[in-house]
Every structure is written in structure tokens, then in C-alpha cells.
Amino acid sequence: MEAHRRDVSHKRPFVRLNVAESVDGKLAPAKRGKVNFGSDDDRFEMENFRADADGVIIGGGTLLGEDPPLIIRNQEILARRLATKGSKHPKNICICSSLPPNLAEMKFFTNEETEKLVFTTPRTPSHLIKLAQQHAQVELITLNASGRVDLAEVVRRLPAHGIKSLLLEGGGELNFSMLEAGFVDEVCITLAPFIFGGRSAPTSFDGVGFSCENVRKLSLKSHRVNSHGEIFLRYDVVAEAPTITPSRLFSNGIQIS
Ligand SMILES: NC(=O)c1ccc[n+]([C@@H]2O[C@H](COP(=O)([O-])OP(=O)(O)OC[C@H]3O[C@@H](n4cnc5c(N)ncnc54)[C@H](OP(=O)(O)O)[C@@H]3O)[C@@H](O)[C@H]2O)c1
């Protein structure tokens, strides 16, 4: 049986993934842009996760699409965070193979309250690296076989930046790559009562997808429904691959359990 949590090194941070998705599994409508579809209750959950984390990480698609400062606004959560971690916000981290030319105008880079850490590659022109260094710590990472940031290298370097617990906030491409690499421990999903549709709308896990033999298995830890009709789902990522047996329903199919 193949173990899916391939990197079980205690040196890597604990990684919690948190997303809000529509009932049809989309992170945003097909036209994307800034869309906030979670309730205050969802924001409260997210900010508590941020308070627990040393760092919060996003992919280049989310940086460009939302340009979010990844901060805590709720005063009670801020006070708890300050008491336990000694800083107001988790370190804001971004993975982007090539940094955007307008970075000096972006909220992610210009927010005065956050510490920032950027993982990029030699695909970013040197003048943009220098510019980014005025706002953030910048780490140059080699490209992997797909021409993207090598995540194993990123994860290996995080403890040196004081990151023992990491909150992964998407989007779907980075989520998939992190799960595929075996770097996700917990999956937290807020299922919101909307249908976005659209085959090109981002989902919680995009990438190339897993083969039947390699689908990732989750173990439900808790669930909660609120008065807005949102469902909060918390899962552990199961280390073992699912069991594959011939399907009882289809003679040429397989059953995954
Ligand atoms: N509802 C929610 O909770 C939520 C949360 C987050 C995002 N979103 C939405 O999701 C959408 C963005 O998602 P997305 O999937 O397009 O983008 P994404 O996952 O945020 O970022 C993908 C990008 O990250 C960079 N990257 C570098 N190395 C990578 C690696 N090893 N694996 C994967 N990516 C790597 C690549 O940028 P380069 O092109 O520079 O290589 C890649 O294009 C936006 O619409 C955003 O609003 C929603």
C-alpha cells in the first residue's frame, strides 16, 4: 500500500489547508475576481486558523486575483494571537514562479502590519527581485520538472523562517500540488450554499488530478452547520492509499474504499 503522506519528517511544519467552496466545489465563479461568499462566521473561523499559524501561504493565482493582505481583523482573536505568538498576524507567504511587475502597488506587499516571505524562481527579472526585497524576504527556489517552484525545497526552508505551523489558503493549483507532494495534514472546508458552475471555475484541488489508484483519502474529524446554511468540515489527510477492489456494480470497474 502506497503511503500518501510521503514526507513524514517532523522537521516540516504542520500544514492546515482552509478553503471556502460552493456546493459544486468551486473556489470562485468562472470569471474569478474578488468574490467574498463566506459569512462573518466563516471569516471568524478563518481568522482563528490564522491566529494559530506561524505563516499563511497562497499561490501566485490568488496573489494576482485577490491581492489579499492575510491579516486578522477581529480584536479578540488579535489579542489571543498577540498573547500566544507575540505578533499580530502570521507571516504572509506567497509562491509565485514569476513576480508581477506591479508588485509595489499590491496590498500583499504594501501592508504595513505584516511580515512577508516570497518564494520565487530565476524566472523573475532581477529588477523585480530587488523591488520585492524592499517589501519582503525573497527566497530564490529552483524550478521543478513542471517549471514551477519546487515545493519540497520551500517546505524544507520554512522552519528556518520560524514556521512550525502553516495555513494553506489556496488556490486550487497550489492546494493540489501541496497535497500531491504529501505536505497537507488537515483539510478544512466551508461548504457555502451557492452553485457557481463553470468548467473553468477554480476548484479546491485543480492540477492534473489523481489516478484512481492514487486518490487521496480523508478522515472526517468534525462538522458543524450554521444558520446561514454553511457546513464546516474538518478532515485529517489519511496517510495510506485507499483500498482498490473489483467493483460489485460494474464488471470492468473498480471500487475505492
Ligand atoms: N474560496 C477560497 O477559499 C479561495 C482561496 C484561495 C483562492 N481562491 C480563488 O482561487 C483562484 C486562484 O486559484 P489558482 O488555482 O488559479 O491559483 P493559485 O493556486 O493561487 O496559484 C497557482 C500559481 O502558483 C504558482 N506556483 C508556483 N509553484 C507552484 C507549484 N509548485 N504548484 C502550484 N502552483 C505553483 C504558479 O504561478 P506561476 O504562474 O507564477 O508559476 C501557479 O500558476 C482565484 O480566483 C482566487 O480568488 C479562492
Image: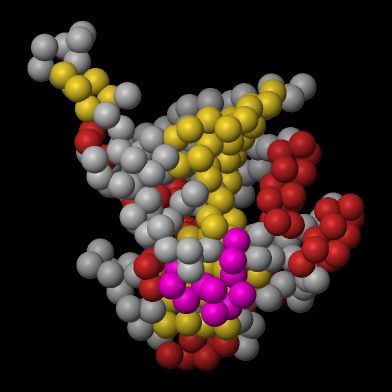
Q: Is residue 132 magenta?
A: no
Vertical comparison of 34 with 85: above or below: above
Seen at 39% across and 35% down, the residue is 217
Q: Which residues are magenta?
A: 155-165
- Whether residue 98 appears in this view of the structure is no
Depth check: 148 or 150 in front? 150
Depth check: 121 or 154 in front? 154
Vertical comparison of 5 with 81: above or below: above
Count of numbered marks: 0
Vertical comparison of 152 with 244: above or below: below
Residue 123 point in image, percent of width and height: 35, 79
Residue 209 point in image, percent of width and height: 29, 42
Seen at 56% across and 51% down, the residue is 16
Vertical comparison of 60 with 200: above or below: below
Q: Please, which residue is most extreme toward the top here?
A: 249
Seen at 23% across and 33% down, the residue is 212
Seen at 53% across and 30% down, the residue is 220
